[in-house]
């Protein structure tokens, strides 16, 4: 059964720092992994989707890597800004599928000026 | 990307009543899902909304409590029935295309049951 873990649970940093958020999963037979951002009380915004054949995806100041064999993904945020403050969630498909998602508990990020 | 409109965005309801949440997508999509996010928790899948047939529920969720409709490829509803305070959560609609495509989410419905 697929399980997803995110570390750290919370992070508070000064503006300008480079950050690494971690996501691990127990079943490495995944088709893809997706990173989301959630602002308090709101829905999810898709940040990056990494296919199983890829090792990295980049969007602006965000870079996500995927290591299937070790069951890990990292989200790198460069030059953090207060507007990056949110909860970041990673999700992978249920074991044996590619549609229904199972989520980690998230990393709550606070970037202070 | 798909634009998803969810209504209502929030509601406060009396226990024992029911609330129907609507999810409208700006284009036809293959897969539609409903998730629940309890306070301080991550997302849990309730069910897959199947067009023209009964929804497929995950373990722990039943049709009598969470009836779902999906009359076409752009619209779905989730009803939370006979509500109790434990149903207070954010309910989210999600859509996805074929296979390895990106999943998109609506803005969620924040439900408080008093």
Image (tube, coloured by chain):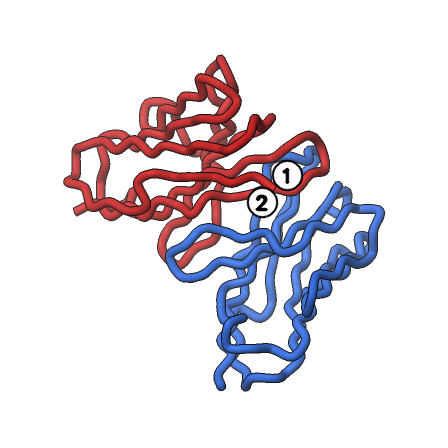
Chain colours: A blue, B red
- Please state the horizontal and vertical placement of residue B60, each as a whole percent of the image: 43, 34
Residue at 47%, 53% in the rendered image: B42
The image quarter containing residue B28 is: top right
* Of residues B27 and A63, the one drawn nearer to the viewer in this rendering: B27
Q: Is residue B100 above or below residue A72?
A: above
Examine the rendering and report whether any part of residue A78 can be seen.
Answer: yes
Residue at 42% x, 47% y is: B107
Q: Earlier in the sequence, mark 1 or mark 2?
A: 1
Task: Depth check: give the residue in front, B58 or B75.
Answer: B75
Pointer 1 with pointer 2, Cβ within 8 A: yes
Regarding mark 1 in the picture, which secondary structure is present there? loop
* Location of mark 1 (residue): A94
> Tag 2, which secondary structure?
strand
Q: Quadrant of residue A60?
A: bottom right
Quadrant housing residue A55? bottom right
Do discs 1 and 2 share a chain?
A: yes
Chain letter of the residue carrying label 2: A
Chain of the residue on which disc 1 is drawn: A
Could you say where residue B64 lies in the image, as x and y percent from the top left? 32, 23
Q: Position of residue A15 (x, y in %)?
A: 56, 84
Residue depicted at 41% across the width and 33% down the height: B23
In the shown orientation, is residue A76 left or right of residue A7?
right
**Which quadrant of the figure contains the N terminus of chain B?**
top right
* Mark 1 crowdedness (10 Å alpha carbons): few <14, some 14-19, many ≥20: some
What is the distance, in whole Å, between disc 1 and disc 2 at their CAs? 6 Å
User: Badge 2 is on which residue?
Assistant: A102
- Using residue A98 as the reference point, say whether residue B105 is left or right of it: left
């Amino acid at each position: 059964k697929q399980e997803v873990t995110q570390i750290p649970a919370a992070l508070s940093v000064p503006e300008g720092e480079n950050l690494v958020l971690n996501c691990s999963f127990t079943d490495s037979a995944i088709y893809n992994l997706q990173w989301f951002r959630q602002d308090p009380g709101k829905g999810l915004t898709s940040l990056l989707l990494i296919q199983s054949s890829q090792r990295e995806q980049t969007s602006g100041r965000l870079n996500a890597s995927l290591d299937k064999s070790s069951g890990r993904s990292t989200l790198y945020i460069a030059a953090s800004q207060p507007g990056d403050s949110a909860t970041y969630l990673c999700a992978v498909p249920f074991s044996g599928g590619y549609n229904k998602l199972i989520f980690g508990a998230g990393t709550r990020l606070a970037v202070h000026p | 990307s798909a634009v998803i409109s969810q209504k209502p965005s929030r509601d406060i309801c009396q226990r024992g009543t029911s609330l129907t949440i609507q999810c409208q997508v700006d284009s036809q999509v293959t897969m539609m899902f409903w998730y629940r996010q309890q306070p301080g928790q991550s997302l849990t899948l309730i069910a897959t909304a199947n067009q023209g047939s009964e929804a497929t529920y995950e373990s722990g969720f039943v049709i009598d409590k969470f009836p779902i409709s999906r009359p076409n490829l752009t619209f779905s509803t989730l009803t939370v029935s006979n509500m109790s305070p434990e149903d207070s959560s954010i309910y989210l609609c999600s859509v996805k295309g074929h296979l390895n495509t990106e999943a998109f989410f609506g803005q969620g419905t924040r439900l408080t049951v008093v």
